[in-house]
Image (cartoon, coloured by chain):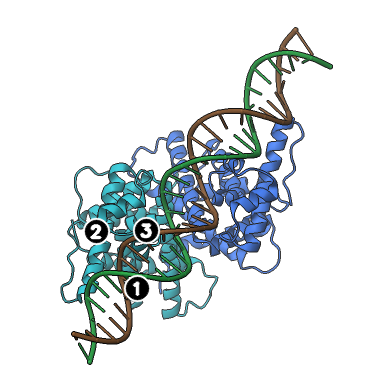
Chain colours: A cyan, B blue, C green, D brown
DNA sequence: TAGTCTTACGCCACTCAGTGGCATATACCT
DNA sequence: AGGTATATGCCACTGAGTGGCGTAAGACTA
């Protein structure tokens, strides 16, 4: 169920990582079982044996703790984007590849399952959905800032980078949703495959007729 | 500052419309002046001389009241979408036109200003931004449902309609953002113009190279 | 115009998320 | 072992949002 704790760190740091992970796991468990609104923070904190005050030193909100796995992916994405050299291909194609790279850096044991739990929770909890979307929005803006820093992008009113990023996110959401409704367990490769499909559908969505 | 009240309605309904509008206007005023978090619902309710209990009979949340103007547009959009006959053109092109039509039905006195106030508030208030995005998401899903009802859309795994809708929303956000940073007042036509620019940028965003 | 019915509203008490302050404990360092 | 830094716990508080119930005000009917 867990991401292993790197043992090279000082005891204090290891403890912190462990409580953090315990909060995430327990939260996903309880939220899934009793619903997001049906679980109080006091209950969650009691289960992990941590004070509510401490909870808020680890996470910004009740929604935040359940979003952590997804958050990890996009944090990795932004990191990769910072150390990235464009080749001749399409911006969109390269963003897609960067996302694949980031995806490859996620723990492949249980990570996708946690992401799917998050997604299913968001599907039935408006405030979680809202929080997740807001996080995507922040990521988009951060990515644009990075693009602007690394390559001039002379015209600040050029809307294309922003639109390209939004398409990336949209495709990601599509892929996740497809995977959510897929019966049986899923792993990182399944997500990758769904992502490829979603990316492939982008050009057609612009020219599609009814 | 106000949307006029249709005088054909019974007194009770007119009163309701008036308190609703008063809540919206006062909220935008206070939020803009003192910040979203710097304004309590008790203050707002006191200013409009309404109990907090009543506030929640009109709106679902504190964020909701400030989003009302934008909400009106997308509600109109969905209405138009329901009574819509496809011609030979691109799905995306027709969605764009539907949005323009809906836009034409908004009150052109002050409406855009309210939308811009909302947008500026969202820019500096995470919870408002989140709420707004969540609303867009709901709209997207509703639109897809409508599309599916009206034309078979045989394959439920065809991602293109969803992606097209997301592009429409992305372009709308781009247009709004551009308008937000434009100095001086803005009217409905300005928004229309920005929208055209944003829509025009979509194909290029797929093929753009860096 | 009176009488009744309906519906919106106000009030009150309550739950729960989130915050600030301060005392205490626990890991770190020398 | 002793001093320092930092994470945690406890307590009291604010503010959003809800449920229940009595009351007032608009809406139909005669």
The answer to whether A157 appears left or right of A105 in the picture is: right
Q: Are marks 2 and 1 on the same chain?
A: yes
Residue at image point 36% right, 53% down = A173
The reply to whether residue A165 is visible in this rendering is yes
- Of residue A111 and residue B208, the one placed in the foreground of this image is A111
Contact? badges 2 and 1 (CB < 8 Å): no
Residue C14 percent across, percent down from the top left? 46, 42
Q: Secondary structure at mark 1?
A: helix
Crowding near the residue tagged with mark 2, few <14, some 14–19, many ≥20 C-alpha atoms within 10 Å: some
Residue at (24%, 55%) from the top-left corner?
A112
Q: Where does the C terminus of chain B fall, quadrant-wise?
A: bottom left
**Numbered badge on residue A81:** 1
Q: Are marks 1 and 3 in contact (CB under 8 Å)?
A: no
Marks 2, 3 in one chain = yes
1 or 3: tag closer to the N-terminus = 3
| Residue A75 picture quarter | bottom left
Disc 3: CA contacts within 10 A as few (<14), some (14-19) or many (>=20): some
Residue nearest the viewer, comparing B116 with A44 = A44
Which of label 2 and label 3 is nearer to you? 2
Image quadrant assignment for residue A24? bottom left
Do discs 1 and 3 share a chain? yes
Q: Which residue is mark 3?
A: A64
Give the label, 1 or 3, closer to the camera: 3
Q: Callout 2: helix, strand or loop?
A: helix
Q: Residue A154 at what x, y percent from top left? A: 51, 78
- Distance between mark 2 and mark 3 Cα atoms: 14 Å
Category of crowding for the residue at label 1, using alpha-carbon neighbours closer than 10 angstroms: few (below 14), some (14–19), many (at least 20): many
Tell me where residue A148 sits by quadrant. bottom left
Is residue B90 visible in the rendered image? The answer is no
Rendered image: mark on residue A22 = 2
């Amino acid at each position: 169920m867990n991401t292993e704790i790197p043992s090279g760190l000082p005891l204090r740091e290891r403890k912190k990582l462990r409580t953090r992970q315990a909060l995430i796991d327990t939260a996903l468990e309880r939220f899934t079982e009793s619903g997001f609104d049906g679980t109080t923070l006091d209950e969650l904190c009691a289960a992990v044996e941590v004070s509510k005050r401490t909870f808020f030193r680890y996470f910004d909100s009740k929604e935040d703790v359940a979003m952590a796995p997804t958050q990890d992916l996009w944090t990795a994405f932004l990191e990769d984007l910072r150390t990235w050299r464009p080749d001749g291909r399409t911006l969109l194609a390269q963003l897609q590849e960067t996302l694949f790279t980031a995806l490859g850096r996620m723990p492949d044991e249980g990570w996708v399952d946690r992401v799917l739990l998050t997604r299913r929770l968001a599907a039935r909890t408006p405030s979680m959905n809202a929080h997740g979307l807001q996080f995507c929005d922040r990521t988009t803006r951060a990515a644009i800032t990075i693009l602007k820093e690394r390559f001039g992008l002379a015209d600040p009113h050029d809307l294309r980078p922003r639109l390209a990023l939004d398409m990336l996110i949209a495709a990601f959401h599509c892929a996740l949703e497809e995977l959510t409704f897929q019966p049986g367990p899923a792993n990182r490769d399944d997500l990758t495959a769904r992502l490829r499909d979603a990316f492939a559908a982008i050009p057609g969505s612009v020219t599609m007729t009814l």
